[in-house]
Amino acid sequence: MRRTPALVSSAVLVTLVATALVGCSASSDGCQPAIAPGDASVLVSATGAVGGSTVPTVSVPTPLTTTEPERSVLVKGDGAVASDGMTVDFDAVLFDGATGSQITETFSSDGSLFGTAGGNGALYTALQCARVGDRLSITTPLRDSGLGGLDQYTDDQLAQTVVMVVDIVGVYLGKADGANQLPQDGMPTVVTAVDGTPGLAAGLVSPPAESRSSVIKAGGGAEVAEGDAVVMHVSRWTWASATGDVNQTFTSWGLSPRLQLVSTDAPDVTDDSGATALSSDLVDVLVGSTVGSQLLVVSVPDEGDAQVYVIDVLGIVSDEE
């Protein structure tokens, strides 16, 4: 499997890009891209297999400039379509439009780079309506790119053009979409925003004496097996036994989904350092769950406060990806 849970975060990519830059027609399924092709994006070409581990050979005529984001499809795929809000697994190689020099790439990494289709910035807006197997050419001023760490640059630097060639590797849910289930007595109450971000209220009850779990939304997708690599959103709270108060200590919402091996030998989904493994409580709940589900887990240790997890199961990465 090309993808592994050694997650490459979008923050790594955007930091490299920002530092280096210093010195539309509807598709066949009716999805309408938010960014149209333009005079700059159509001039970019690329060869090489789509979705592989080898960086494509890209031709960027220089100097290449644009005053607004542009998006062209260099290779048309035939896989799943990324509608607005869905999670997209992609690889990218980035160039300086002025010189044509490569800035950074993710193709040679073992990790996964996830973005939200239709998200803020040209890179993520351009993912909307992309298909698995597509190769996109995106040209944009740096200020509109969606890349991070830009507040330290001058107006002239932010006006520079960045060229991105993006291969679409996978498309997954953006949030749990399963059927709502009845809440269980004694468990925290989970509420979700329109975009799927969960919140928690547990102050009216004390934590249970033993670990418990429940299904908030029951998905209708594929079933998770032990050892699967699962794309998920996760949030974690500490639930104080003395007061019943909850305090959020981690969330992937607002960042990007996580790719996690469902195994007690794998890095913890909530630990970016990879120093710990999934608890048996989490593995037991994830195994047998279905894509599209939202899961609530209260993990009660022998000592200390309970930990509460809300997990959205967004997809399972296949061996072919």
Image: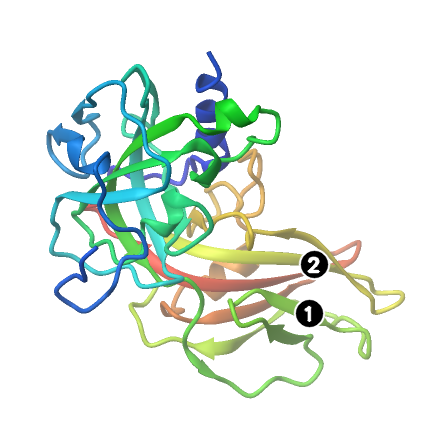
Which residue is the site of mark 2?
237
The spot of residue 284 in percent (x, y) is: 48, 62
- Residue 272 shows in the view: yes
Q: Is residue 272 left or right of residue 291?
A: right
In-front residue for pair 211/135: 135
Q: Amino acid at mark 1?
A: Leu
Q: Nearer the viewer, residue 12 or 246?
A: 12
Residue 205 versus residue 159: which sits nearer the camera? 159
Q: Quadrant of residue 281?
A: bottom right
Identify whether 243 is placed above or below 43.
below
Residue at 71%, 81% in the rendered image: 186
Identify whether 303 is placed above or below 46: below
Residue 305: horizontal and vertical position, in percent? 78, 58
User: N-terminal of the two: label 2 or label 1?
Assistant: 1
Type of amino acid at the residue the image marks with label 2? Trp
Residue furthest top in the image: 23
Mark 2 secondary-structure assignment: strand
How has the structure been colored for display?
A: rainbow
- Tell me if I can see residue 106 in this picture: no
Quadrant of residue 109 within the rendered picture: top left
Drawn side of residue 300 relative to residue 89, left or right: right
Identify the residue position indicated by label 1 in the image.
200
Position in image of residue 41 (x %, y %): 22, 37
